[in-house]
Amino acid sequence: MNITEAKAVLNKRGFLDLPVDPSLDLFAEIEKLKKETNAIILAHYYQEADIQDVADYIGDSLGLAQQAASTNADVIVFAGVHFMAETAKILNPTKKVLLPDLNAGCSLADSAPAEAFRKFKEAHPDHIVISYINCTAEVKALSDIICTSGNVEKIIESLPKDQKIIFAPDRNLGAYVNKLTGRNMLLWDGSCQVHEIFSLEKILSLKRQHPEALLLAHPECEEIILKEADFIGSTTQILKYATSSPAKEFIVATEAGILHQMEKDSPDKVFIPAPPSNACACNDCPYMKLNTLEKLYLCMKFQLPEIKMDENLRLAAKKPIDKMMEISRKAGLIK
């Protein structure tokens, strides 16, 4: 198949829905394509295990943004969701940024439509806007500072106590930070579908079955879950805590993809995914799991789908990311 035919398939499906020879060693083929194209694969902790194992870097939003900003690769293959690949393009206008499946969106980013958010911002002209990195490029462009769950406390603390703040798009993270810092930020009413479906009843039942287990929770979870948590932190912070803790059992209230790295780092420990309130036994993000090893291979082979961005939008969205990086460096969070 030539590139024209591949583009036609892509336009119909949002990814390269093409047959892959089942006899191919995809790990070897992907490594070969990396060398041929000078590509780097950046993967989020929530990706499937095979993708994490083939990635050059695995991390959370802050680490991924930092890697995207510093890479010398000509091609960035982003195994994550759309806003993450957008962020990589914002930071690397001259590099080719690929995303295996354009349908890999984000319920949290979708909960803040840019035009509605613009009107919300205009209604509060005396507020500055701090937006969680899990938002679209258009919302980033409307923001003053971007944050992640790993640096949000330091970002807030860098501002005067009397500074009025709009926090978007995650209301749960915003409420947690308000409580943590004593602020009264104005919260946009958005949320992540994965972190909102955890069942308190099922988690408490698990804790009774595993009385020695510690509950680790992401701050995107609802307050009723966070109140029961033994530790609250970003995906990287949760991973580090589980590795360093003397405890041997953990209930993990975030997307289940992180368990792969937890089990690799601490094979002697037991990690139990916190159950959701629906009938499914898992807490996978349906968008993160749209990426597969086959789609990753095809994406690298045909150099599609590629993330493109208007330059004016890119420059406007880059300013609050640069501000985040500046504050994070001053706080010693990144080098």
Image: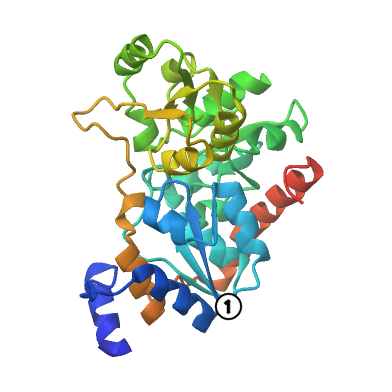
Whole-percent x, y for residue 292 in the image: 32, 60
For image coordinates 49% across by 25% down, the residue present is 216
Q: Where does residue 88 sit, x and y in percent of width and height?
A: 55, 63
Assign the N terminus to one quadrant of the image.
bottom left
214 relative to 72 in the view: left or right: left
Q: Residue furthest front?
A: 268
Amino acid type, mark 1: Asp
| Residue at 54%, 32% in the rendered image | 238
Tell me the residue at 57%/56% (across/down): 141
- For residue 292, above or below residue 254: below
- Dot 1 crowding, Cα within 10 Å, few <14, some 14–19, many 20+: some
Residue 305 visible? no
Side of 100 relative to 75 (left or right): left
Q: Which residue is mark 1?
A: 74
262 or 154, nearer to the observer: 262
Q: Is residue 103 visible?
A: yes
Position of 125 with respect to 97 (left or right) is right
Tell me where residue 104 sits by quadrant.
bottom left
Relative to 214, say whether 5 is above or below: below
- For residue 273, what is the image quadrant? top left
Q: Answer above or below: position of 96 versus 126.
A: below
Q: Nearer the viewer, residue 34 or 188?
A: 34
